[in-house]
Amino acid sequence: MHEKATSPQASHDYIEVRSPGRINLIGEHTDYNGGFVLPAAIDKQIIVKIATNGSDDSCSLEAKNLSENFDFSLSRIEPQSQSWANYALGMIHEFQKLGLSMRGFDASIEGNVPIGGGMSSSAAFECSFGFALNAIFKLGLERMDIIQAAQRAENDFVGTQCGVMDIFTSVMGKADHVIMLDCRSLDYSYFPLQLGDYELLLLNTNVSHSLADTAYNTRRQECETGAGLFQKKYPKVNQLRDVDAAMLESFYDTLPDPINRRCRHVVTENLRVQEATKVLAQGNLQRMGELMYASHNSLRDDYEVSCPELDFLVHETVHRPEVLGSRMMGGGFGGCTLSLIHSPAREQFVEEIAKRYKESFSLELTPYHVKLADGTGFMPA
């Protein structure tokens, strides 16, 4: 169902590529620990339009949603104060490191993936931009090449030590399916998401966050510290992915706080992802909801990446029978909650919770009803 990273459109001097945002049903902060995740691409996307301009070196970018422009030279690629441009420049930088040749172009970027909403607008931007460059300059890259280049760009050029999940999902998504992804081996399987009378509802706190400016990188360092401590007792441990429940229990009290709690989140979250694939296959949505609540509690208490706004929205659902489960989604410190809700009750639920949210935080709540979509692809010619 996925076309290759190259396309018949590559013979033209104008290319238009779309790449979706993503949700993650469960499995948060496990990806950069080599663990398991259960994400899906959604029907919100970033679109990159690109055309060659006849120059050997001069390029321009237009961020239509921001009404901003950025001009640069291919011979001088370096991080910029216009942070959005760094996602594009990082991809160019990675392609240049691979010895790939490009020339002058003009590109525009626009879309409807909310910035700061935890739906990975940055990954969607990187992937659509990378695919556009690959196609228009016939670079010969495969999908996995672009996935890996995008992760390096975000880690090394942008400076966010993210895992591979967001980028992989944006590229490899499949309509009406979630992806069970092993973030170490990149082995993956598609699972149909059959919710019956239920649906996935995102509630955006509208609390802004930038992963590069939060404790995201600190959490990654804490996990690496924890893995190193485990490795001294269990030499086969390379990442927290390798720690099982019995090892955690026997070693937990030996670890310093908060390292012990960071490790506990990752180990238990991996187990929740693995159980989630089983209960979804069984159609056991009740248990899926319980796993979502357990995930949020772990992210709040052990990983400490939640915030009052997210906690409020999850707590508001606990005693509502129309909601089977809810949790914060994404890096944390803002963004969205993801809830599994009975479809006929959605409208009234949103109206009531938005009112209470505004009363508590003086903020508007933005709901998103999302459908699961295909990954990165070319727009119709």
Image (tube, grey):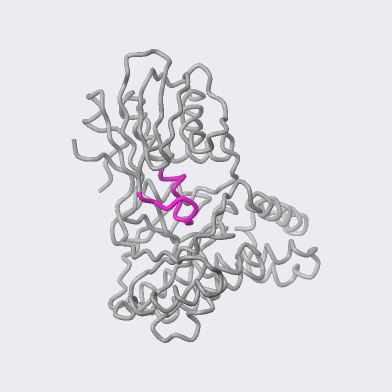
**Placement of 101 over or under 169, stated as above or below:** above
Q: Residue 62 lies in magenta, yes or no?
A: no
From the viewer's perspective, is 200 left or right of 240?
A: left
**Where residue 4 sits in the image (x, y, percent)?**
29, 38
**Where residue 349 sits in the image (x, y, percent)?**
39, 79
From the viewer's perspective, is 135 left or right of 119?
A: left
Q: Residue 116 lies in magenta, yes or no?
A: yes
**Placement of 94 over or under 344, stated as above or below:** above
**Placement of 344 over or under 72, stated as above or below:** below
Q: Looking at the picture, tell me which residue is in the foreground, 76 or 247.
A: 76
From the viewer's perspective, is 22 left or right of 357?
A: left
Q: Main secondary structure of the magenta part?
A: loop
Magenta stretch, residue numbers: 112-124
Q: Residue furthest left?
A: 381
**Placement of 97 over or under 142, stated as above or below:** above
Q: Looking at the picture, tell me which residue is in the foreground, 204 or 146.
A: 204
**Where residue 81 sits in the image (x, y, percent)?**
57, 33
**Where residue 277 sits in the image (x, y, percent)?**
42, 68
Residue at the (56%, 67%) spot, across then down: 269
Residue at the (47%, 22%) spot, across then down: 72
